[in-house]
Image (cartoon, rainbow, N blue to C red):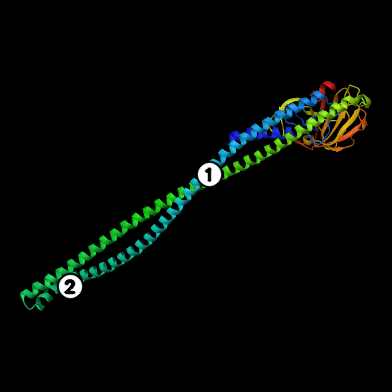
Amino acid sequence: MASYFRPLTRALWVAILAMTFLIGSGPAHANENPAEAHGASTNQASPQTWTLDDLQQRQTVVDQYRQQVNQQKEQLQQLEGAARERLGGLQKTLQATTSQLDNQQQQLQVATESLEKVQKELQTVESRYQQRREVTADRLKYLQRNRKTQNWSTLLQSQSLEDLLDKQYYLKRVYAADQRVLSGLKQEADQVNAKKVEIETRKNEIALLLQQLNSQKDQYEQQAKAQRDLVLRLNTDRRALEAAEAQLSRDSKNLSILIQQRIAIQSSYQNGKPPIPGTGQMILPTQGSVTSPFGWRIHPVLGSQRFHAGLDVGAEEGTPIVAADSGTVILAEWYGGYGYAVIIDHGNNITTLYGHCSQLFVTVGQSVNKGELIAAVGSTGLSTGPHLHFEVRIKGEPMDPVAFL
């Protein structure tokens, strides 16, 4: 179950992050290509560099992501159903094992009580045997010591030969009776001992079975817990996908409205004031070393291969960030996966983005010159440590910033 659960989790991240990009992100996306997951805020208006074609393309992307979300949701529902079915089977097995344990516990109790009873019987028989054995032994010792005297005494005390024979006969019968009693007691003790061994063997067998059943019960309980956790995770991810699907539906509707607004803006743009153009030659916005270049990489937070839409420049928290070129600030606030970010429009459909800032020193609509202080390095948003994420985009498409430096 876990082997096909992980890919769905990654896909879920892609869908949820992509959900937040499409309406308000404009020409910059949180370290991702438009075809990948995007971490930007959904609360911003479209930057002025967007064209009608750009908006229509993003409408198509929204529809594609919504279809992917639906497919993932169906797969999660199937996995959740299978997990619930397996959980039901485990619970039944656990109930049966618990019932067997209860039954074996009862048998063990009966065997223990029987063993205690037999042990008492054995003690009684052994005590009787020992007492009778001592009495018989004393009698034999007495007769052995006084054998000659006894023979003469028996002879002298006899009234006749017949009386003498009778006394000898009865004396022999006493001896024989003693031997039979001792033999009977010995047999009884042997039987009790055999019964004791049998009950002890049965008790050991039951104890071993109880140990095995307890081990099985522990395994079933662990499996059931893991299955319950899996059902919970699948259910949580399914709800997250449903939320993503709802957000994508809202984004799709908002894009339709935005397209109409962009048509109106294009028709009246000739009366507007274009942004301050840049020089065309940019500078690195902060002091530091490049820690992650433009292009494909393993995302440090999500753990999957993603397209890195800019440069990461490692620097200490609070290091100054300056404008790479002259232009007009079109965004300066929290921006989804970028954290606190600034976007500058340099004209000619060129924009730059400065992400993961700790502080912002400019506002929307403000004109800035190349090298002017705009923010400070931080680690806000989807970030693993203090650094500047720097992007250059043309018509919203990411370009390698090195080509502009």
Q: Please, is residue 182 above or below residue 266 in the view?
A: below
Please report the residue visible at 32 percent of the width from the left and 63 percent of the height from the top: 122
Q: Is residue 130 above or below residue 97?
A: below
Answer few, some or many: residues within 10 Å of disc 1's Cα (few below 14, many 20 plus, some between 14 and 19): some
Q: Work out whether 151 lies above or below 341.
A: below
Quadrant position of residue 296: top right
In percent of width and height, residue 90 lies at 51, 44
Crowding at label 2, few (<14), some or many (≥20) Cα neighbours within 10 Å?
A: few
The residue type indicated by label 2 comes to: Asn
Between 6 and 380, the one nearer to me in the picture: 6
Q: Nearer the viewer, mark 2 or mark 1?
A: 1
Q: Is residue 58 visible from the viewing direction of this image? A: yes
Mark closest to the chain's N terminus, 2 or 1: 1
| Quadrant occupied by the N terminus | top right
Amino acid beneath label 1? Gly
Label 2 SS: loop
**Residue 293 visible to an observer of this rendering:** no
Quadrant housing residue 31:
top right
Say left or right for 292 vs 143: right
At horizontal 65% and vertical 41% (from top left) the residue drawn is 236
Q: State the separation of the CA atoms marked 2 and 1.
A: 86 Å
Residue 176 picture location, percent across and down:
17, 66
Residue under the image location 57 percent in, 45 percent down: 225
Q: Which residue is mark 2?
A: 146
> In x, y percent, where is residue 405?
85, 23
Closest to the observer, 336 or 248 = 248
Judged from the image, the secondary structure of the residue bearing numbered disc 1 is helix
In-front residue for pair 404/341: 341
Marks 2 and 1: CB-CB under 8 Å? Answer: no
Label placed on residue 88: 1
Could you tell me residue 64's position as x and y percent? 70, 28
